[in-house]
Image (cartoon, rainbow, N blue to C red):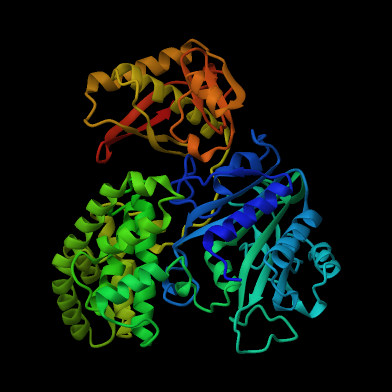
């Protein structure tokens, strides 16, 4: 049987529905209220408050397919199985079932539903940490796998330890919080090489397909790891890798998740995929990066030199650079964007709704970069020659960035091809003289993380609800809505739909109205209801698509009523004094306010 992407997703969700899991829709790629990451990198991000103990309106068993984006493996893209954008199948238990049932579900789905031969599976287990955390190896998980027919020689204990969250240990995302061991499932990929009797996770022929995180500990502020009162399960399985495995493909780019894009690249470049190693690698990079770029653009993120916009720019420009090596014609990015949208628009409405924006922005970015790419490469070759094979100075690397639009990573990549180093430290010094660039975005190494639920962020979250409603009233725009937010312990950053700069009088009026509501000591009330009930009650919620049939509605007195996942203060009197510190443009038709509580 040849599996399709839709069949795999349906089989997964149907299976967990039969195990009494509620099915959630995918959350946006741009996380709401999680300042620790630029993009949703795993299905657990939207579930943060619930993993920390808040009850979920749909219950304790959940499952979904979540669109995700990670750039920590960007240098590996170009092989057969690394990707920046991917879809992740996941199931969760929020204090309900735990290790035995989670592993049994995984085994049953893989061997009974997907009919994967058990002899082609290998399992990794947390190997313990004698020194740092004193947490023992996870013999319990190993015994469960043995009882399910996995042979002892196909189980490997990983001994990376807890401190760096490597080798079968997850979290905590911040300094404290839920964490625990994981058990990972691997598949023997080659069809022409016999499956070894012993599983070796270091052998790249074994490819990870599923990961069950067993959150049974909580790390406290003293650095101690204690058994958690609420034990959670968090799992993740990549659609792309799993689909390739099911269809006996050793190359993800030959599956339906990428093949239509590859075929269009072949047509536009007049090159044949698989014929030449470097050309094939270039095609994979272009296909991966432009698919990721289209999904980022579908959430109205624009190319820029900071944060998400910088990641987007980096992906598009890297694709264009490789397109140049294939002699791709102008505006090829738009043609490939059309293919991506046609592949996924039935499942992700935002692709269809924002098609015009996607085409305009990707075309503009390609034209911008093409104008400077040739001259930038000439300048690079000149300074590379002058360096005599030693090092590109930070000053020259910054000039390539500032004058020719080369992201630092692109300069480093071209330099690596010529076996030359780049003085990254002095580049950053040069850069800091001009503007602040997020180092996490620059290196593409931001970790999967959780927004904290500290008292400060809880208060700011509640104040943001007041700000949202105050803006509607002061600006006389009842349909004004949230276009994104980012809350840390120090400030709230709130994006909203509005087409002009606010006057100083309007900013003061918004501040005054929020502070008035704080002084009125309004109670904050949470109610559970269906989406339809919430709409009838007048609740605002542009993020409602990421919730299931039931939602939480938070009311602040009679002033504000919004669909939200929390956390919130109990009364506005807890908030202190609200102050707007900045109002600026975020993107076309979107303004941004930064505010604090004093």
How many numbered markers are drawn?
0
State whether residue 358 appears in this view.
yes
- Is 128 situated left or right of 371 in this image? right
Between 99 and 63, the one nearer to me in the picture: 63
Going by the image, does 339 lie left or right of 526? left
Q: Is residue 205 left or right of residue 558?
A: right
Residue 244, horizontal then vertical, whole percent: 55, 72
- Residue 591: image quadrant is top left
Q: Residue furthest front?
A: 1
**Residue drawn where x is 60% and y is 61% of the image:** 237
Is residue 158 among the parts visible in the rendering?
no
Reply above or below: 342 against 177: below
Q: Residue furthest top?
A: 520
Tell which of 524 and 184 is nearer to you: 184
Q: Classify 277 as above or below 412.
A: below
What percent of the width, then of the height, locates residue 146? 84, 70
Q: Quadrant of the C terminus?
A: top left
* Quarter of the rendering containing residue 105: bottom right
Left or right: 68 in relation to 160: left
Residue at 69 percent across and 53 percent down: it is 15
Up/down of 329 relative to 211, above or below: below
Q: Quadrant of the N terminus?
A: bottom right
Image x and y of residue 281, in percent: 38, 79
Does 174 appear above or below 293? above
Could you tell me residue 415's position as x and y percent? 30, 79
């Amino acid at each position: 049987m040849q599996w399709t992407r839709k069949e795999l997703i349906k089989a997964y969700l149907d299976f967990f529905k039969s195990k009494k899991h509620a099915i959630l829709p995918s959350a946006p790629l741009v996380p709401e209220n999680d300042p620790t990451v630029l993009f949703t990198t795993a299905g657990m991000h939207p579930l943060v408050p619930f993993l920390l103990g808040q009850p979920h309106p749909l219950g304790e068993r959940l499952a979904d397919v979540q669109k995700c984006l990670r750039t920590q493996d960007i240098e590996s893209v170009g092989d057969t199985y690394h990707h920046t954008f991917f879809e992740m199948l996941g199931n969760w238990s929020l204090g309900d079932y735990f290790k035995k049932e989670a592993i049994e579900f995984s085994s049953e789905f893989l061997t009974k539903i997907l009919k994967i031969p058990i002899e082609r599976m290998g399992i990794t287990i947390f190997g313990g940490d004698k020194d740092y955390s004193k947490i023992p190896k996870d013999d319990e998980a190993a015994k469960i796998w043995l009882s399910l027919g996995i042979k002892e020689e196909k189980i490997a204990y990983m001994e990376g330890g807890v401190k760096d969250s490597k080798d079968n240990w997850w979290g905590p995302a911040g300094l404290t919080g839920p964490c625990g061991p994981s058990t990972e499932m691997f598949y023997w990929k080659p069809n022409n090489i016999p499956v070894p009797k012993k599983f070796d996770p270091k052998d790249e022929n074994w490819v990870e397909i599923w990961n069950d995180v067993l959150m049974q500990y909580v790390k406290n502020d003293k650095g101690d790891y204690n058994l958690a009162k609420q034990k959670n399960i968090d799992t993740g399985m990549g659609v792309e890798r799993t689909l390739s495995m099911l269809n006996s493909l050793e190359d993800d780019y030959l599956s339906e998740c990428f093949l239509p894009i590859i075929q269009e690249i072949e047509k536009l470049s007049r090159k044949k995929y698989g014929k030449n190693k470097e050309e094939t690698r270039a095609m994979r990079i272009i296909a991966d990066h432009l698919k990721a770029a289209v999904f980022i653009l579908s959430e109205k993120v624009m190319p820029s030199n900071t944060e998400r916009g910088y990641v987007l720019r980096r992906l598009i420009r890297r694709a264009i650079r490789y397109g140049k090596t294939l002699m791709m014609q102008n505006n090829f990015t738009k043609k490939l964007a059309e293919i991506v949208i046609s592949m996924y628009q039935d499942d992700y409405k935002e692709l269809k709704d924002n098609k015009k924006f996607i085409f305009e922005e990707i075309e503009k970015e390609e034209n911008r970069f093409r104008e400077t790419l040739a001259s930038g490469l000439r300048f690079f070759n000149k300074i590379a020659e002058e360096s005599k094979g030693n090092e590109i100075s930070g000053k020259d690397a910054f000039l390539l960035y500032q004058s020719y639009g080369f992201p630092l990573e692109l300069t480093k990549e071209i330099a690596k091809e010529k076996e030359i180093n780049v003085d990254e430290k002095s580049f950053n010094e040069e850069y800091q003289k001009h503007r602040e660039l997020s180092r996490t975005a620059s290196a593409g190494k931001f970790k999967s993380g959780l927004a904290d639920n500290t008292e400060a962020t809880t208060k700011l979250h509640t104040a943001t609800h007041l700000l949202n409603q105050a803006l509607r009233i002061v600006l006389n725009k009842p349909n004004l809505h949230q276009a994104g937010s980012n809350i840390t312990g120090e400030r709230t950053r709130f994006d909203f739909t509005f087409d002009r700069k606010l006057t100083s009088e309007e900013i003061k009026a918004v501040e005054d109205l929020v502070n008035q509501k704080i002084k009125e000591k309004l109670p904050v009330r949470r109610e559970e209801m269906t989406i339809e009930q919430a709409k009838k009650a007048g609740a605002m919620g542009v993020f409602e698509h990421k919730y299931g049939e039931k939602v939480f509605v938070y009311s602040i007195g009679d002033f504000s009523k919004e669909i939200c996942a929390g956390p919130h203060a109990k009364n506005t009197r807890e908030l202190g004094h609200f102050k707007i510190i900045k109002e600026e443009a975020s993107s076309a038709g979107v303004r941004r306010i930064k505010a604090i509580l004093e």
